[in-house]
Amino acid sequence: MRETAVSTVREAAEWTEPARLAGLPPYPLADVPDIKARLLAEGRSVIDLGVGDPGLPVPEVAIEVVREAVGDPALSKYGFQRGLPGYRTSIAGWMGRRFGVAVDPDVELLPVIGTKEAIALTAFAVLDPGDSVIVPDPGYAAYFGGSHFAAANVIRTPLRAEEGFLIPPDVIRRAPGRLRLVYMNYPNNPTSAVAEVSYLREVVAVCHERGAVLLFDNAYSEITFDGFRAPGLLEIEGGREIGLEFHSMSKTYNMTGWRLGWAAGNRQLIAALRRVKTFFDTGAFMALQAAGAAVLADPDAYIQWSLAQLASRREAAVRAFRAAGLDVTAPLGTLYLWFPVPSSETSEAFCRRLLLESGLVLLPGSSMGPGGEGFVRASLAIPEDAWEEAGRRVREAL
Ligand SMILES: Cc1ncc(COP(=O)(O)O)c(C=O)c1O
């Protein structure tokens, strides 16, 4: 038994990576979990602002419903792609209230096991090898990942501060090759930029011109401040014809580990994604979908509460980091502060130094793509009263 295990390890060591795997970019600070564990084992205090997880309590109704639901044998069966009908009707109700749009829960919605997987799999539903795809840089890893594994021509498009971190519509208009897909995400991770309705209208128009599908990742639609209301793709005229919009329970309801979200939009695209997913997964656990249905049916009070927590963290974070000498602006959306590296170091070198010297975990901009170099991301992942200490550690390191 032991010998077999050893020989398997030996064989694995001789294994040659396929080109697509070898072609994945390295992940800066991949060793952070190990460093963090080592610091904690040495008794050092670590403040983790690297993860996009607010760590707030999930809605009580989710816990109540899931407790019951796990005892229901019908909900322990395969959910398959259509999942629990009540989850889809609840989503349709939520989309109607939030965006004023009518969505057919049978053909224009698809439950997904967290949006990350489905965002990546959309590339397989839309792209042939060699097709062009626009991927924001910096941007969420699943956009690049899906496109890369689908052997597409990935056009990494820089998000620039001077352009409000928006993808200029002209870049879409002039993209080389057979442009079939545009990945877009506002409120944006990592830059925290937001998009106005007028911008989205322009983007929809130019995607129509190019015959490209727009994947609008709206994972942070509900996390906005100072009265800003994030638009949805389906409320834009023509948006439904060319696009899919993704929503996640993760950030909106602090349910990151539950792995639940949905895609909404063009019925042919929904059908295509459903077909792809049939070959990759068998649907989200229906007991979790039952909880999701209950949460979405009763959303507003919880979101208001959660946003109030994040808003006070945002104030505290901006105050503490400005006092520490960082050039931060209060974001209008998302959980992130996105600021220039305050030294001549690379973002990775700066973040590594802060981790080792001060036990402060930050995300180097370069980990979100080469276009993120020169910037750092800090998540609103710690309570309001912990920011002063985080700021003190930055000041000390500078
Ligand atoms: C921009 C963006 N999209 C999608 C996701 C994925 O969310 P989930 O897979 O938890 O639904 C995240 C998570 O960090 C994100 O930042």
Image (tube, rainbow, N blue to C red):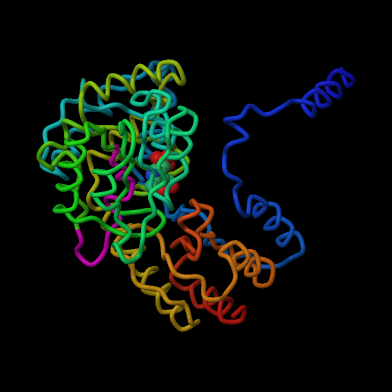
Q: Is residue 25 magenta?
A: no
Left or right of 76, for residue 274: left
Left or right of 304, for residue 375: right
In this rendering, the answer to whether 33 lies above or below 97 is: below
Query: Where residue 214 sits in the image (x, y, percent)?
Result: 26, 37
The answer to whether any part of residue 255 appears in the image is no
**Residue in the foreground of this view, choosing between 29 and 96:** 29
Left or right of 2, for residue 376: left
**Residue in the foreground of this view, choosing between 316 and 187:** 187
Q: Is residue 220 magenta?
A: yes
Q: Quadrant of residue 46?
A: bottom right
Q: Residue at x 15, y 41 (%)?
A: 205
Count the marks. Answer: 0
The answer to whether any part of residue 316 appears in the image is yes
Q: Residue at x 27, y 52 (%)?
A: 222
Query: Where residue 64 sits in the image (x, y, percent)?
Result: 37, 38
**Residue in the foreground of this view, choosing between 124 and 131:** 131
Which stretch did the figure color magenta? Answer: 215-228
Query: Where residue 338 sits in the image (x, y, percent)?
Result: 42, 65
Name the quadrant of the C terminus: bottom right
Left or right of 108, for residue 32: right
Query: Where residue 360 sits in the image (x, y, percent)?
Result: 60, 67
The chief SS type of the magenta part is loop
Q: Residue at x 57, y 30 (%)?
A: 20
Q: Quadrant of residue 8?
A: top right
In this rendering, the answer to whether 149 lies above or below 378 is: above
- Which quadrant of the figure shows ligand 1? top left
Name the quadrant of the N terminus: top right
